[in-house]
Image (spheres, grey):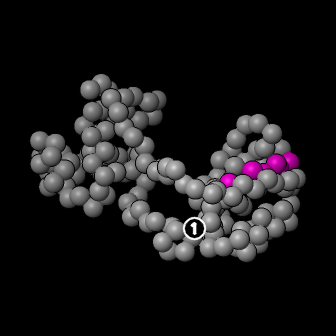
Amino acid sequence: MGVCTSPSNELDELDLRIIGLLQEDSRISFNKIASKLGISVGTAYNRIKSLEEKGILKGYTVIVDPAKIGYGTIAIILIQAEGAHLVDVENEVAKMDNVVAVYDITGDFDIAVIARFKDRFGLNAFVKKILSMPYVRRTVTNVVLNVVKEDFRVKISS
């Protein structure tokens, strides 16, 4: 396996293997990581702490099936915003509870938002709230009919 480098953070093969194990199970112990990778527990601990300090590991969480807890309606909302205020609109939308992701995009629209709702009434209120925001020109809302794949983990390959 090769070395993956970036300008601000150099990751070696061991870092990538540790990240892969943590993505499979974020509750895995330092002992188990050390055992699986043939390294000392201290090395596993120090590497993970370093990855956290560099901001590569941003946190640890569980993966919940949103539909099973009542958030089965997914929308992809495209937003046109006034250029000088684009970042302001993005930051305000990012604070909204239903929002899963906000992307600054190219093309006819400036912002793509992925959001989840309990029902169409929640979606309707959300879109109206966005449309009432200053500097929002227009939106286009797409409702997801079927999730074919949804996995925000990065697949690490060598």
Q: Residue at x 57, y 70 (%)?
A: 71
Q: Which residue is mark 1?
A: 72
Q: Residue at x 52, y 68 (%)?
A: 67
Q: Residue at x 11, y 48 (%)?
A: 35
**Residue 108 on image: x %, y %:** 81, 39
Q: Characterize the magenta stretch by its predominant secondary structure.
A: strand
Quadrant in which the N terminus is drawn: top left
Q: Nearer the viewer, residue 142 or 155?
A: 142
103 versus 91 height, above or below: above
Quadrant in which the C terminus is drawn: top left
Left or right side of 5 for 139: right
Residue 88 can be seen, yes or no = no
Residue 25 found in image quarter: bottom left
Q: Nearer the viewer, residue 91 or 17?
A: 17
Q: Nearer the viewer, residue 13 or 71?
A: 71
Amino acid type at image mark 1: Gly
- 89 part of magenta stretch: no
Q: Residue at x 86, y 53 (%)?
A: 138
Residue 149 can be seen, yes or no = yes
Q: Secondary structure at mark 1?
A: loop
59 versus 9 height, above or below: below
Left or right side of 37 for 125: right
Tell me the magenta residue range. 76-82
- 79 part of magenta stretch: yes
**Residue 93 on image: x %, y %:** 70, 60
**Residue 133 on image: x %, y %:** 83, 63
Badge 1 local density, few (<14 within 10 Å), some, or many (20+)?
Answer: some
| Furthest residue toward top | 2
Residue 32 found in image quarter: bottom left
